[in-house]
Every structure is written in C-alpha cells, then in structure tokens.
Amino acid sequence: MQTLDVALAERSYPIHIGPDLLSTSLIRERIRGNQVMVVTNETIAPRYLERVTASLGDLQCDTVILPDGEQYKTLATLERIFDALMEKRHSRTTTLVALGGGVVGDMVGFAAACFQRGVDFIQVPTTLLAQVDSSVGGKTAVNHPRGKNMIGAFHQPRSVIIDIRVLDTLPEREFAAGMAEVIKYGLIRDPRFFDWLEQHRSDLQRRDDAALTEAILRSCRNKAEVVAADETEQGNRALLNLGHTFGHAMETFTGYRQWLHGEAVAAGMVMAARMSRELGWLSNDDVARVAGSLSPWGLPVTAPEGMTTADFSDLMALDKKVRNGRLRLVLLKRIGEALVTGEYHPNALTRTLEAFCDKG
Amino acid sequence: MQTLDVALAERSYPIHIGPDLLSTSLIRERIRGNQVMVVTNETIAPRYLERVTASLGDLQCDTVILPDGEQYKTLATLERIFDALMEKRHSRTTTLVALGGGVVGDMVGFAAACFQRGVDFIQVPTTLLAQVDSSVGGKTAVNHPRGKNMIGAFHQPRSVIIDIRVLDTLPEREFAAGMAEVIKYGLIRDPRFFDWLEQHRSDLQRRDDAALTEAILRSCRNKAEVVAADETEQGNRALLNLGHTFGHAMETFTGYRQWLHGEAVAAGMVMAARMSRELGWLSNDDVARVAGSLSPWGLPVTAPEGMTTADFSDLMALDKKVRNGRLRLVLLKRIGEALVTGEYHPNALTRTLEAFCDKG
C-alpha cells in the first residue's frame, strides 16, 4: 500500500492506494464518532457495499443507495441523504462514507459539508476518474440545470482510500474516461509523466497492477501538490481545469447524458491544444501528440453531434472562469506546462470553435 | 454611525450601526465586482428594496423577492435564489445582499456559501433579532422538516449594515422577540449589561434612538467577541445557544409557525434558569429575575399549549448538542455567567421538563 499525504493547514489527510484495501480495517480506523452513513449507488451497492459495512460492525452503520448517473447529481438527490441522516438521528460527530464514482463523491462531500454545518467524510472512490481527480482536493458540488457544479463547497475528506482492485469491474469506457484525467496531469505540469504514459499505454490498457498503481500515485501526487499550494482555487489550481471550460459546455449541451465527464474533458483538452496552436505556443505535431494520447483509448476528440459555435459561446458565458465578463481559459504553453489566461485575441477563440464544430 | 470590527483570521469584517444607513453609499462601497443580487421578502420589498437598489445603479443589480416566513427557510426556497443567479448569469465575483430578517439572512448567507462554492455577501438586517444575532457570526442554514438549521455552512459576510431606522416599521411582537436575544447576552456573559437593560427598559420600550443604538452595539460586541474567539463553534460559542436547545424543541413542536424564534428562546432561557436552580446554581429570586426581564415584553415564559415532556425528550434527542448520545445543555452558573455541560443528574432535566410542561 502506498500512502500520500495531502498537506493542508489544520486539515491534512492521507490518501491510501493499493490492492484489496476494502478488505482491511482502514475505513474503520479513520472514523472518530460512533455513527457512520455509507452512501453509494445502485451499481456499486451489490458489488462492494457489504464488504464496507462488514468492517464497521461496532458502529451505528446506516446506508443510502442512490440512483446511478450524473443526471442525479442534484439538490433533490442531496435531500435524500439529509433525510436519511435525520431519520436515523445522526449527530454532528457522524462520518459519511462516499462509496462510488465522482458523482457519489461530490454529492456526499457536499452533504458532509452542509449537514449540521460540517461533518467528517471519507472518500472510497470506485472509478479511475474519481480515484485520480474528484476524490482529491475537497471540491464538492451538485449541478444546477443551467450549469455543472454550480452549487457546492470546499470540504476536505478525513482520508481517501483507493482500492485498485475495484477497477476490475469498471467498464472499459469508464476506465478510458479516467485515463483522460491521468493524461491531463502530464499535459499541465509533468512532461516526464506524459512521456511515461505514452510508453506504458499497453500496460495500462491491460490494467497491469504495477502500472496502474504508478499512474494513480503520480496523478494523485500531482493533484495533491497543486491543491496543497492553492486550496480554494484562487491561483494555479485553475490549471487542473484544462479542457474543462470547453468540456463543461459540451456536457451541458448533451444534458450530461451522452458523454462521460472524462470524455468531455478529453475533447476539451484537444480544443485547448488547438487554441494554443492558434496562439503560436504548440506546433501541429504537439496537437497531434495530444490527440494521439487520447484517441487510442476511444476518447472523443471532436465536438458532439449538432453542437455549434453559438452553443459553445452561449454555454461558456456561464462558466465560472468568467471574471467580470472576461473568459479566462486554461491553455498550453507547451506539453507539460499549462497557464490560465484571458489575454488572447478573441479571434483565436472564434477560429478554434469554428474549426472544432466543423470537425476540422 | 458606530463601527465594530469582527476579528476573524483572513475574514475580518465591519458592522456599521446607526440611523438612516440605507440612504448612504455604504453597501455600494463594500461590493468588489460588477454584479449584485439583492434578496429580500414580500414584506420588506415594498418598504426598503428601492432604497437599496437606488444606491447600486452603476452595477448589474438583480433582485429576488421571497415569501415571508420561517416555513420558507428550505432547500426549495434556496433553489429560487440559485435559479435567479444562473438565469441572470451571475459569476463568481457577484455579491449577494441579504435585506431582511434572520430567515432571509440565513438563507442568503447559505446561498452565498454554496453558489460557485462561495461568493461575497452583505447582511442588511431589518429586524432587531437579525441585527443582534443572526447577522453576526457567519452561521448560515436552512431548516430540514425534522430539525432547524440542520443544513448550512459557516460563511462570513463582507460587512453588516444595521440601519436602526428600519425598526420604526417593525411590529411590537417582533421587536420583543429581538429583545429576548439582547437580554441573552446579559445573561450569558455581561451582568452589567443585564443591569443596564433592567434600568432602561422603558427607554427601549418606546424605542429611544440612543438606548436602541447602545443595546444593539453592546449585543453585537458581545456576540462578536464570542465568535472571534471560536469561529466554528468548537467551544465557548455554544454559550450563545442559551435557551436554544429547549427553544428549538418548542419551535419544532409548533411547526415553526406559532412562535417567533426569539419567543421560543425566551421560554427556553426560563427553562435553563429553572434547571440551573435544580442544580443549585441559581436562587428562586434569580429565576424570578430572569423571567421578570422577559415577561414585560410579552415574551412567553411557559411551554406551548399541549407540549408534553415526551415531546421535549423526543425532539431534543435530535439536537446538535447531542454528542455521542449525551445531551449537553447551556445553563447558568449565575446571572451573567453561562456554561455548557453534560455533567448533571438526568433527574434534574426530567424535573425541569415536568414542572415546565405543567406550567408549574
């Protein structure tokens, strides 16, 4: 088992990574009170819920099983968690356990942030995406019908427990969506990791234990370093959003149903690379290398069917990167170095959108 | 105008108190971005909304008018604020203004805590209760059907602007409910203020400007001192809840409709005084003095019609003061000194509840 410490003033926490961690007492050891509420979804519950609750037998252990899907990441679903906590009389010293992917993690984290103005929670991510992204950093949220993650809080988990064995049952498509975020860390700040990922693609594609552990550890370390330096997203943390401004627009356009989050981010990163080429920072070869790191995983590198430049403009105006009317974007200075900027000629954005929507 | 600084690391903010502040540029001066959303209710809007928006004319200024009443302090009402923010395309740099009583303040503060994971907000409290209590300290929340303030966040305002002139239109009953919280500060930590309040009761009853300013200033200073020492309610901040554990039970029993919050707190403080007498800390005269400071204002000092000891036990078990099963209560060592304790014989609580429910 590997352990990584995320250093945050007053609220540092460990990330444990390794095989078969759900069969240990790790979760139990991190719970301070005598109540725990394990929240999961209909897909994960039959596979792993009993294994988790079995280790918590000496506590008041209650469970909530939510429907599975990004479309349920709403205030209405959040209320079901609050209802269960109130019905089972959970107090301020309770601990919430998020057993599931990013949707479960974001919602349970937000529920923990709000219930009685803040209780403990533990992340047990069951998708590659959640393991390398949403389970690290303390960003929690639900969606609004008009925009993704618009309602949320910063709330750090007590710990993150990553059992790589749970990836054995993860569908190919979801695994690939997680790889998009893994590749992102290479692109934004770790060129050697990007090289390593190119070299070990076949190991990762057959889900080799050692390669997987290494990829997750390096991803979490990259994310943890960024988050530790900038907990509430005032500065460099925004680099983690490479591909996300474009990606959120595509997710909103498709009603959060057609594409997985990681798929939208993959297409969004290709857009960011193309726009970086418009600004003279990347070469044609660089753009091809970015797309070539994603497409072998079956990740989309073109716009959703029917989406126009007008759709992009409309949806991106709502994005959190709009500061007093100026759209700030995460772009690439080179492969392995991202920057956030609003200093570009509007035509560069227009040309990027037009070429992308033409599937150019 | 008097100004009080609430000292909180990284998030200190001023409280301004004085007559006719709504006619100044004070609110405008505290807004950093170019968007503002003023949220108020149907009662306050016709009286003060235009005066507030008039001073914000150079900004994108939108408004939300909510129904008036504690029964609307719900997640559903919160969604109306989010809907308006999204519809009018407010960004992360927006400022929310809470123009109203405690219900508006708590909800708008919570909306500001959650919208895009946290935006600025300014409190403009229009009731005496909100001016001396809920507008100071950063506690925000909505109610759950099974319990008050169960869903919320700690989120400090950018500033609090208290215009005592708005009290001119405040109904007598609501004014008295605010006085319950004013008296509370004397009871928990400021015996000289308690004496002063007894001596100036008639000045306060005719709402004399100088007496009112003094009472609000001393209340806010007491609260600000407690909050500054204990921002997230780990320790002494709990003293501010004198009367609240009993009071919340009474509010929940009556469905938040029959009694105003301050009225429930008044009755709850009488219960706390009686229980303190059971424990030998207060004399009969002390208890009479506590009740005698409240009843001239028309505040209730007995249980709601029909409420039994079983109702109390049931509802208090849900309260946040339950830590791992032990009910901690705020009680009085003497008039002017409160303490939080779970160290008492259960019979003392039982006797207090029985006598109180008998209207004894």
Image (cartoon, coloured by chain):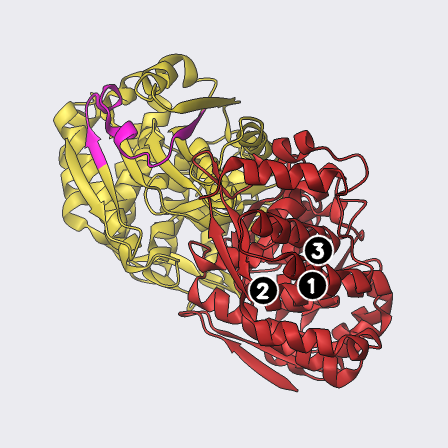
Chain colours: A yellow, B red
Q: Chain of mark 1?
A: B
Occupied quadrant, residue B53: bottom right
At x 63%, y 63%, the residue is B184
Task: Report which residue position mark 2 lands on.
Answer: B335
Q: Chain of mark 3?
A: B
- Name above or below for residue A359 compared with residue B168: above
Q: Are marks 3 and 1 on the same chain?
A: yes
Q: Position of residue A320 (x, y in %)?
A: 51, 56
Distance (Cα) linking label 2 and label 3: 15 Å
The amino acid at mark 2 is: Ile
Looking at the image, is mark 2 or mark 3 nearer the viewer? 2
Task: Report which residue position mark 3 lands on.
Answer: B266
Q: In which quadrant is the C terminus of chain A drawn?
A: top left
Helix, strand or loop status at disc 1: helix
- Name above or below for residue B146 compared with residue B103: above
**Left or right of A8 in this view: B85:** right
* Comes first in the chain, label 1 or label 2: 1
Occupied quadrant, residue A57: top left
Q: Are marks 2 and 3 on the same chain?
A: yes
